[in-house]
Amino acid sequence: MSITEKILCSKTHEYILENSDNTYTIGLTDYAVEQLGDIVFLELPEVGTEYKKGETFATIESVKAASEIYMPISGKIIEVNSEIADTPETLNEDSYEKGWLVKVEMTGNEAELSDLMEYEDYKEELE
């Protein structure tokens, strides 16, 4: 089973993956990374910071543009992918396995997941 069969995507191109311990991994979809082009800088939040759904939690810069990354669910940051902050170009190679951004503990309720799309539906919406 590929990772894209397990993730949910937001309209703003973030993905969320539920982990076995009821935490969630958040990152950018392959489409978003492709649109940005070569990624040169990534600013990630501190562990312990809490965000509401829709708030900006990170900033990404590519040779083309700078963009904000939005939190797809309300949550508290429990882990940051520090490796990706040091080598943001990894995102261009693998936005799912190695290129995740943060892991969060959900602080909102399950209803927050209702406006997220399965990867296939997300891809269709892009066309």
Image: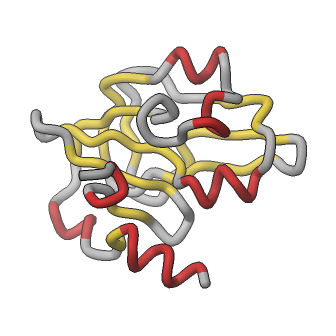
The answer to which of 96 and 117 lies nearer the viewer is: 96
Q: Residue 118 location in percent, x, y?
A: 33, 71
User: In this view, which residue lies farthest toward the right?
Assistant: 63
Asked if residue 101 is positioned above or below residue 127 in the image, the reply reads: above
* Residue 59 or residue 121, whichever sits in front: 121
How many marks on residues? 0
Front residue of 84/66: it is 84
| Residue 13 drawn at (x, y percent) | 54, 61
20 or 4, nearer to the observer: 4
Q: In x, y percent, where is residue 1?
A: 23, 52
Residue ID at (53%, 41%): 95
Q: Name the quadrant containing residue 85.
A: top right
Split into 4 quadrants, where in the image is the C terminus?
bottom right
> Which residue: 45% across, 66% down?
10
Q: Check the image and name the residue furthest to the front.
A: 1
41 versus 7 height, above or below: above
Tell whether 125 sits left or right of 88: left
The residue drawn where x is 52% and y is 83% is 125
Q: Residue at x 50, y 74 (%)?
A: 123
The residue at the far left in this view is 21
Up the image or down, 41 lies above or below 12; here it is above
